[in-house]
Image (spheres, rainbow, N blue to C red):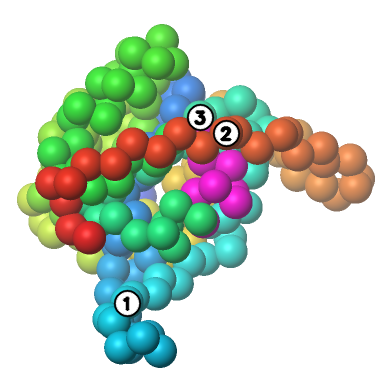
Amino acid sequence: MQRGDILYNTLYMEQAIERARKIRAILTDVDGILTDGKVNFFVRDDGKIDEFKSFNTQDGLAVMLCNSTNIVCGIITGRRHPTTVDRARNLGYKYMYQGFLTKMGPLNDILKKEGLTPDQVAYIGDDITDMPLLKAVGFAATVPNALDVVKNCAHYVTKRNGGDGAYREIIDFILNAQGKLAPLLDQVNNSAWKVNKKSQLEIVTSQEGIA
């Protein structure tokens, strides 16, 4: 299977499933993946300009599912904003690297901390700054409105758009490939799902990115 070749057919899907079975950590960009990519500005009472982000609750539950199956979740984003930090902390992400337009450093840092190899990591991104990571990891995913050059780096392109459940689609795909999704659903149906304790968020900030 060549990167960028993922179509919804049996051949490529089977190979994507094989890659997904190895995943122990899922890392993602924010804008365009966890959000729709739009930046919404408003004027605060003190006259300063600020922004707000809209996140999908189904994506949020996906992080809790990963925590229940001991899959590490992390964020590597070129922007810096307290809304994203608060969202990551509340959901139980383990890593938050913000302000990183050059993203290989954070990936290598997480690999070292977790004792993982690149083929055990999934990364989700939609723009050119994500391409080095998409090329480096074992399972690379993106969204339908990503740039074509980014899609050419991916093993999997979601059906759902960023900010509209694309992240959840990828999490479900990985958990299903590992045989972990059905047991979780059984637990939920039987009111027996015990959510693991949230990870303590580790925040690393760089000044190279966009405030």
Percent coordinates x, y for residue 188 in the rendering: 82, 47
Q: Earlier in the sequence, mark 3 or mark 1?
A: 1
Percent coordinates x, y for residue 165 in the rendering: 48, 62
Q: Residue at x 30, y 62 (%)?
A: 32
Front in this rendered view, residue 174 or 53: 53
Q: Is residue 122 magenta?
A: no
Residue type beneath disc 1: Asp
Q: Which region of the structure is painted magenta?
A: 87-94
Q: Above or below — where is 143 with respect to 124?
A: below
Residue type beneath disc 2: Gln
Q: Above or below — where is 86 with respect to 124?
A: below
* Residue annotated with mark 1: 50
Helix, strand or loop at label 2? It is loop
Q: Residue at x 40, y 89 (%)?
A: 45
- The quarter of the rendered structure image containing the C terminus is bottom left
Q: CA distance from mark 2 to mark 1?
A: 27 Å
Residue type beneath disc 3: Val
> Would you identify the image quadrant in which residue 144 lies?
bottom left
Instruction: Decide: few, some or many residues near mark 3? Use Cα within 10 Å; few <14, some 14-19, many ≥20.
Output: many
Q: Is residue 90 magenta?
A: yes
Front in this rendered view, residue 92 or 167: 92
* Lateral position of residue 130 relative to residue 14, left or right: left
* Lateral position of residue 2 relative to residue 51, left or right: left
* Residue annotated with mark 3: 72
